[in-house]
Image (cartoon, rainbow, N blue to C red):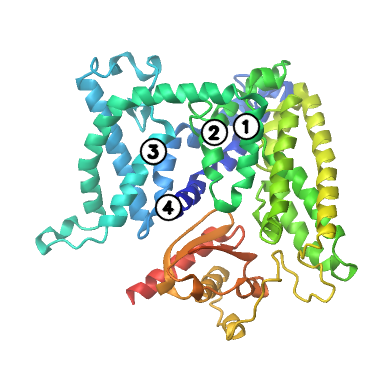
């Protein structure tokens, strides 16, 4: 299970980049639309050509998703030298596809894929990095990257005899990968047509699941967030082949110009309701925050407002909800389940009223890739979306407020005499011997290094760290001895972190949006101490 969680966390590395490129495509679509921009955006004008160039840059990540995942995963999965692991994964993936190309070239009829016809004319083929090969989608990139990363973790530090010293490290990993990729390429040529058939059947099943499928998808995507397994829910659908071969995001942006100019209902043009989870992040977060604020004693309202406002804005604007959700997740988990139920129901209801599109993030996604480009012909759908969203904001507010008061849930700031209000419960705070001394460690002048040093001490030192990775807002670790890890109060002291989660030997430090920088500093400190 730990390996699965670690892999799920690694998926976020390439996925996070899709948001920016999606916004680029959204604005390019907007500025190339003559119906919105007028004659300046007509085909052939300088304005049109400029934005066509910008749009081409926005397609980079969608056109090369396989390579992005192949290179991106080792940055989190590699236990040492992640940069070298990423390069080895790239080399392994290129060798894999080159071997497939050679096999199909030498035995075209055996495997039923004749490259001479051109990949654009044969279903199931694709040019990747200029190599004509089988279209294994991101699954191929993920599998090959995982295999090479395993080889890297196992053999990167292998000491070779002096006469073979030149082959140590990265070269040794690539050498082993060379001989591993050849049989894997051959096996792929044999079994991939069958796998493609299975994927096609799965696509039909998912698409045909209707409202039940839409509701279940959004419920699981939300309720699995604490485990990190939600990456396995949305990634195969949004950027993988589960619904359409190249992922729903690419499918949406490939046709968004057509959708914008057509008066047909969006649901008829794009009949997929699987990227609507952003509605729960926008409308649900507002209702939750208002409920928390209204149930806070008057003495602490200013303190809790100072914490809720930035956390809520982060959720609403960019769709990062963890800082807010973790506030109540581990104090009253049933509130989080209720959140998942309400969000899934809201998304399904919106889908029933014709809402589809790229609504996976926050308002940035809403405006840039949906509302602004498509509002001219589809404004009524978006008005209905907002009305339903505001109704659910009210439902969120009253239900959460009722439950908080009914069960006297000890959310931050609800104690009148509470001096230190945090976005994570202080009820589990236990003063440990020496914790105050640890909190006063000398500053390095670098916020990320200071946090990394502080966390490392609270986690029991470098000898207690087995591995480390991260997701969007959390530092995820596996420790050797959970008893050496300090309690939540240590980590939330002076707002060094938003909270701590323990599950067996798995630890999550809720850092916030700076977690990639903190992780890098953390790993540097651990590696330096190991070398010493």
Q: Which residue is mark 2?
A: 237
Q: Which residue is mark 1?
A: 274
Query: Which residue corresponds to the image point at 56% horizontal and 52% vertical from the top-left?
Result: 227
Quadrant hosting residue 128: top left
Q: Do the numbered discs 4 and 1 sit on residues whose CB atoms are within 8 Å?
A: no
Discs 3/2, front: 2
Quadrant hosting residue 530: bottom left
Give whichever of discs 1 and 3 has the lower sequence position.
3
Q: Secondary structure at mark 3?
A: helix
Discs 2/4, front: 4
Q: Which residue lies most toward the right here?
A: 298
Query: Which residue corresponds to the image point at 68% horizontal and 29% vertical from the top-left?
Result: 30
Graded by Cα atoms within 10 Å as few (under 14), some (14 to 19) or many (20 or more), the crowding at tag 1 reads many
Q: Which residue is mark 4?
A: 3
Q: Secondary structure at mark 2?
A: helix
Which mark identifies residue 39? none
User: Is residue 54 visible in this depiction of the protein?
Assistant: yes
User: Is residue 42 visible in this depiction of the protein?
Assistant: no
């Amino acid at each position: 299970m730990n390996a699965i969680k670690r892999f799920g966390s690694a998926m976020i590395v390439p996925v996070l980049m899709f948001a920016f490129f999606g916004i680029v495509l959204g604005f390019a679509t907007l500025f190339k639309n003559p119906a919105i921009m007028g004659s300046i955006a007509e085909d052939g004008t300088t304005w049109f050509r400029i934005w066509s160039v910008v749009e081409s840059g926005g397609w980079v990540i969608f056109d090369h998703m396989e390579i992005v995942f192949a290179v991106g995963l080792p940055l989190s999965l590699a236990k040492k030298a992640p940069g070298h692991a990423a390069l080895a994964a790239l080399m392994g993936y290129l060798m894999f596809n080159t071997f497939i190309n050679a096999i199909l070239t030498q035995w075209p009829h055996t495997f039923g894929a004749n490259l001479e016809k051109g990949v654009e004319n044969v279903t199931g083929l694709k040019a990747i990095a200029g190599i004509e090969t089988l279209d294994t989608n991101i699954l191929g990139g993920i599998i090959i990257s995982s295999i090479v990363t395993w080889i890297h973790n196992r053999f990167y530090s292998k000491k070779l005899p002096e006469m073979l010293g030149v082959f140590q490290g990265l070269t040794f990993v690539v050498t082993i990968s060379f001989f591993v990729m050849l049989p894997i390429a051959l096996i792929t040529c044999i079994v991939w047509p069958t796998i493609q058939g299975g994927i096609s059947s799965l696509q039909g099943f998912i698409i045909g699941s209707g409202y039940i499928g839409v509701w279940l998808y959004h419920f699981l995507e939300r309720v699995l967030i604490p485990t990190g397994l939600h990456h396995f829910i949305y990634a195969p659908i949004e950027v993988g082949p589960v619904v359409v071969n190249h992922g729903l995001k690419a499918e949406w942006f490939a046709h968004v110009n057509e959708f914008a100019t057509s008066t047909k209902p969006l649901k008829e043009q794009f009949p997929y309701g699987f990227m609507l989870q952003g509605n729960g992040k926008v409308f649900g977060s507002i209702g939750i925050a208002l409920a928390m604020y209204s149930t806070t004693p008057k003495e602490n309202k200013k303190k809790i407002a100072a914490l809720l406002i930035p956390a809520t804005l982060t959720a609403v604007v960019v769709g990062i909800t963890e800082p807010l959700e973790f506030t109540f997740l581990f104090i009253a988990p049933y509130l989080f389940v209720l959140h998942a139920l309400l969000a899934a129901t809201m998304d399904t209801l919106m889908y029933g009223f014709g809402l589809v599109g790229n609504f996976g993030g926050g308002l940035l996604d809403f405006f840039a890739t949906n509302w602004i480009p498509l509002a001219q012909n589809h404004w009524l759908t978006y008005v209905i979306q907002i009305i339903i969203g505001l109704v659910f904001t009210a439902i969120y507010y009253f239900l959460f407020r009722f439950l908080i008061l009914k069960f006297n849930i000890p959310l931050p700031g609800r104690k009148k005499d509470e001096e230190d209000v945090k976005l994570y419960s202080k009820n589990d705070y236990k003063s440990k011997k020496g914790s105050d001394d640890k909190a006063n460690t000398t500053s390095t002048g670098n916020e990320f290094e200071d946090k990394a040093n502080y966390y490392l001490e609270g986690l029991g030192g470098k000898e207690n760290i087995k591995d480390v990775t991260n997701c969007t807002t959390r530092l995820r670790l596996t420790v050797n001895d959970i008893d050496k890890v300090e309690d939540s109060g240590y980590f939330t002291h002076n707002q060094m972190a938003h909270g701590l989660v323990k599950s067996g030997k798995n630890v999550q430090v809720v850092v916030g949006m700076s977690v990639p920088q903190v992780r890098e500093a953390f790993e540097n400190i651990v590696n330096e101490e190991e070398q010493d």
